[in-house]
Image (tube, helix red, strand yellow):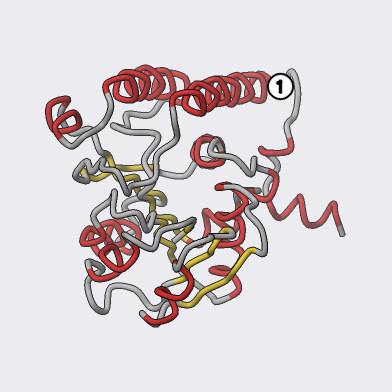
């Protein structure tokens, strides 16, 4: 759980996780100013704290480093803001355990009506549809929602993808999925209910525009990388990255 000021929704998210579906729950607190850490510890969640706010991407970097250190065979990333349904965790993990997919994404847009009735702002719905269509065409995928915060990864995916080279901002998620495609991992999706409400974390219009531009830039990087015109660090496997650094 990458967390920032999630005191009002953390416990509800936690309580919906089916008992026995995961071995350990990690919460990385990115410099929250509320009671997120206190509540997480009361719930028995393993907490790792950033001394200052480093950004959404930096939070995930700490999450995956910690998961690898603990020997995780699969990792579920779910926001503790109750926007995604925790009850779907064992179902997503099942696709990984059965070897059907390497990555599972929760799709909030099974139908347009469900997404809008669930509170997704119209401009976000339209932007999501445009970006997801663009990404599917460029990456050769057929996913319903490239920008969901509900994700499941096999250990091999996290070991291979050089996520440490990624942005510390929201575009980290886009980079990670594009990297997964580049390295040939199998990506699938499952429907998740759309939940937009006051307490759920959401970036504003200005940040959304910035995120959209960053997403298109990542697509361009992918095209350039595939054509061999330039080699970007985000497409160098972690094993090579470490051997070079060493």
Q: Position of residue 27 (x, y in %)?
A: 48, 67
Tell me the quarter of the picture where residue 175 sits: top right
Q: Position of residue 93 (x, y in %)?
A: 31, 61
Q: Position of residue 198 (x, y in %)?
A: 29, 43
- The answer to whether residue 37 is left or right of residue 43 is right
224, above or below 246, in the image: above
49, above or below 211, in the image: below
- The answer to whether residue 158 is left or right of residue 193 is right
- Quarter of the image with the C terminus is bottom right
Label 1: state its secondary structure: loop
Viewer-closest of 206 and 88: 206
Residue at 67% in and 39% down: 234
Residue at 25% in and 65% down: 12
Q: Position of residue 2 (x, y in %)?
A: 48, 57
Residue identifier under label 1 = 228
Tag 1: Cα neighbours inside 10 Å, few (<14), some, or many (≥20)?
few
Residue at 57% in and 58% down: 30
- The answer to whether residue 140 is left or right of residue 59 is left
52, above or below 224, in the image: below
Viewer-closest of 121 and 57: 121
Work out which residue is located at the far front of the displayed protein and give it: 34
């Amino acid at each position: 759980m990458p967390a920032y000021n999630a005191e009002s929704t953390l416990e509800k998210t936690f309580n919906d996780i089916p008992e026995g579906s995961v071995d350990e729950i990690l919460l990385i607190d990115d410099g929250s100013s509320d009671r997120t850490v206190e509540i997480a510890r009361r719930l028995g969640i393993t907490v790792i704290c950033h001394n200052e706010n480093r950004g959404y991407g930096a939070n995930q970097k700490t999450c995956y480093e910690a998961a690898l250190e603990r020997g995780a065979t699969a990792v579920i990333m779910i926001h503790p803001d109750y926007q995604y349904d925790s009850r779907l965790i064992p179902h997503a993990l099942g696709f990984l355990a059965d070897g059907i997919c390497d990555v599972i994404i929760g799709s909030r847009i099974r139908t347009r009506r469900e997404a809008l009735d669930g509170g997704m702002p119209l401009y976000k719905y339209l932007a999501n549809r445009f970006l997801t269509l663009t990404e599917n065409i460029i990456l050769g995928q057929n996913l319903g929602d490239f920008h969901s915060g509900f994700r499941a990864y096999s250990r091999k995916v996290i070991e291979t993808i050089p996520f440490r080279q990624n942005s510390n901002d929201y575009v980290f998620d886009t980079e990670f999925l594009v990297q997964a495609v580049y390295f040939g991992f199998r990506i699938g999706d499952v429907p998740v209910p759309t939940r937009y409400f006051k307490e759920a974390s959401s970036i504003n219009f200005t940040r959304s525009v910035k995120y959209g531009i960053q997403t298109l830039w990542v697509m361009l990087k992918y095209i350039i990388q595939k054509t061999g015109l330039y080699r970007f660090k985000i497409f160098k496997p972690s094993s090579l990255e470490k051997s070079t650094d060493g």
